[in-house]
Amino acid sequence: MKSIDELNEESFNKIKATLDSFSKFKLSLGIFNHPRAKVLERHEKGIGVEKREFIKKSIDLHKNEIIEKMKFFAKNTDFNKKDAIYAVLNATGSYINNNVIRYFINHESKSYLAPLKPSTIKRKKHDIPMRDTDLMYNNLDHIVSNKS
């Protein structure tokens, strides 16, 4: 029979191996392989336009909620399966896209992003930043990939 210390060390090693596995992957959020991707990048980084970090800001505002969701996904994942880490990150990416970023655009963006210019409001017929057309909004996506 194993001692408590042996069990604790075994558990610690399993947790450490799982965390090390997470560090081999990255979760990217944005628009990929779409003409609007450059528009998003320009706004997020402030290249030639006023900086509007709506992805970064939406994640920062909802960081605790995202961590709790990620814990929930991890708790309900069988880490003995080969693609367990991918599954947790993929579920987290879907959650961020579908709930956090879209919520930010629809409800919080006017509070945190620079206001639109009157000429832009006139052209768009609304005052919601980052909501030119639904093309960009509907093409938000996530990718889970190896860091290497």
Image (cartoon, rainbow, N blue to C red):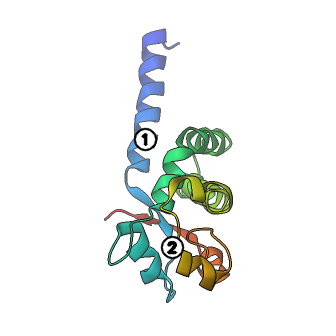
Q: Where is residue 107 in the image (x, y as percent from the top left)?
A: 68, 56
For badge 2, the amino acid type reads Lys
> Mark 1 Cα within 10 Å, few/some/many (few <14, many 20+)?
few
Q: Where is residue 27 in the image (x, y as percent from the top left)?
A: 47, 60
Q: Can residue 87 be seen in this view?
A: no
Question: Compared with residue 71, is residue 104 higher up or lower down, i.e. above or below?
Answer: below
Q: In the current view of this chain or complex, which residue is farthest to the front?
A: 118
Question: Compared with residue 50, is residue 104 higher up or lower down, i.e. above or below?
Answer: above
For badge 1, the amino acid type reads Leu
- Residue nearest the viewer, comparing 32 with 108: 108
- Residue nearest the viewer, comparing 111 with 79: 111
- Mark 1 or 2, nearer chain start: 1
Q: Position of residue 144 (x, y in %)?
A: 49, 64
Question: Compared with residue 30, is residue 48 higher up or lower down, i.e. above or below?
Answer: below
Which residue is labeled 1 in the image?
A: 19
On residue 117, which mark appears? 2
Name the residue located 50 percent from the left edge and 61 percent from the top edge. Answer: 54
Q: Relative to residue 43, is residue 85 drawn left or right?
A: right
Looking at the rendered image, the quarter that the C terminus falls into is: bottom left
